[in-house]
């Protein structure tokens, strides 16, 4: 094994490493202890991979909504995770609650998607046919977006060359349904008793009360959902043929939080979760302004990362022990998120990557 050149993701894929994490014994403990002594520069990669594996079950479960109805949508994902062995050891208390999402993606290499084209696509017209109610249709033939107000207090900013349909008695049933062709930004009035659904080509978006954008033109290869506030659940529509070729993740869906997006490949039915292109401060989307300070004077790197994490609502995963002695001084107030990260990482000789809507910090750390 070429362990000296392994990254965290390589360790997670390695059978011997996983066996040590899940079923350690005297021989494996001795081997990996000797390995860390021989290659101390790999200690961080090893620890990160181990922590991600150990927290796969617990953190995926705790990351979902507490709402019973939404949990039911994702129960198959959780059942699969529960079938994997787990160990209760804890290494990095600061970022343990975020580790599983990255682990899902890294382990997702075993969920290779098929290369065949889908047997058919879903369209705006096909989706409309599922409604049992008479529908109202609004079409934007202009060159500018316009607002469509719904009976429940929700609003839709409909983009040019787009259209939506909804029931004449929109707020009368046990759920609120909108059918979209094109692009629209939704501001959904909160009502836990009547979930709000948006059907856009092959993707179904479910929310209880939030704001988000959906792009689903008929000619596009992808369907994209971007969340500004709140939480949404997205999944591949259950009417898709050849379901046996679609993974559990796509059928049961994923949860998106602010500054996160999901992109559905319509050719492969692959659902990818990531950060939006330009993440915004959470305070910019709240009625009452929230003050965030980005002026740091000899601040610990962990405190800097926590401040950025809180301001943008984005998980930042790092080895708190390795960066415990790193100090940072700068004013990042006017910098966008990714430039903030570039400046911070350059200062402490680290780097970052985006993985499954998380920011993972890597580096040797700082030593006294």
Image (cartoon, rainbow, N blue to C red):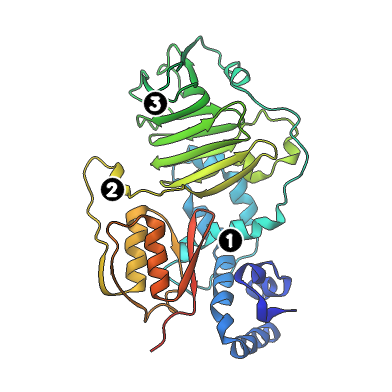
Whether residue 208 sits left or right of residue 262 in the image: it is left
Whether residue 256 appears in this view of the structure is no
Judging by the rendered image, the residue that carries numbered circle 1 is 103
Q: Residues within 10 Å of mark 3 (few under 14, many from 20)?
A: some
Residue 278 location (% of width, % of height): 42, 48
Judging by the rendered image, the residue that carries numbered circle 2 is 283
Using the image, determine if residue 219 lies above or below residue 347: above
Q: Earlier in the sequence, mark 1 or mark 2?
A: 1
Residue 228 location (% of width, % of height): 39, 41
Q: Secondary structure at mark 2?
A: helix
Query: Which of the labelled discs sits on residue 42, or is there none?
Result: none
- Indicate the quadrant containing the C terminus: top left, top right, bottom left or bottom right: bottom left
User: Foreground: 57 or 313?
Assistant: 313
Q: Quadrant of residue 270?
A: top right
Residue 156 location (% of width, % of height): 39, 25
Tell me the distance, in whole angstroms, between the alpha carbons under discs 1 and 3.
Answer: 36 Å
């Amino acid at each position: 094994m070429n362990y000296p050149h392994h990254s965290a993701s390589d360790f997670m894929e390695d059978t011997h490493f996983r066996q040590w994490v899940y079923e350690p014994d005297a021989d494996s403990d001795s081997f990996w202890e000797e390995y860390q002594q021989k290659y101390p520069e790999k200690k961080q990669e090893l620890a990160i991979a181990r922590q991600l594996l150990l927290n796969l079950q617990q953190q995926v479960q705790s990351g979902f909504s507490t709402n019973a109805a939404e949990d039911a949508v994702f129960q198959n994902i959780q059942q699969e995770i529960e079938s994997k062995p787990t160990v209760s050891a804890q290494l990095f208390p600061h970022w343990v609650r975020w580790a599983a999402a990255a682990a899902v993606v890294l382990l997702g290499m075993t969920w290779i998607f098929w290369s065949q084209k889908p047997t058919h696509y879903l369209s705006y017209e096909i989706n409309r046919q599922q409604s049992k109610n008479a529908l109202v249709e609004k079409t934007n033939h202009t060159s500018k977006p316009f607002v469509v107000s719904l009976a429940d207090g929700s609003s839709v900013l409909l983009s040019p060359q787009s259209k939506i349909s909804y029931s004449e008695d929109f707020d009368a049933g046990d759920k609120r349904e909108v059918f979209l062709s094109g692009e629209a930004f939704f501001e959904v009035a909160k009502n836990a008793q009547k979930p709000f659904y948006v059907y856009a080509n092959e993707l179904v978006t479910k929310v209880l009360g939030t704001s988000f954008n959906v792009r689903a033109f008929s000619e596009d290869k992808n369907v994209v959902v971007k969340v500004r506030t709140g939480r949404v659940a997205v999944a591949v529509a259950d009417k898709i043929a050849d379901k046996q070729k679609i993974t559990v993740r796509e059928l049961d869906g994923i949860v998106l939080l602010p500054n996160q997006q999901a992109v559905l490949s319509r050719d492969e039915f692959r659902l990818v979760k990531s950060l939006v292109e330009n993440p915004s401060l959470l305070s910019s989307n709240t009625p009452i302004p929230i003050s965030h300070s980005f002026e740091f004077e000899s601040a610990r790197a962990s405190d800097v990362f926590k401040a950025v994490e809180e301001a943008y609502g984005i998980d930042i995963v790092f080895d708190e022990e390795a960066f415990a002695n790193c100090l940072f001084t700068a004013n990042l107030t006017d910098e966008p998120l990714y430039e903030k990260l570039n400046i911070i990482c350059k200062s402490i000789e680290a780097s970052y990557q985006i993985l499954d809507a998380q920011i993972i910090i890597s580096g040797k750390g700082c030593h006294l």
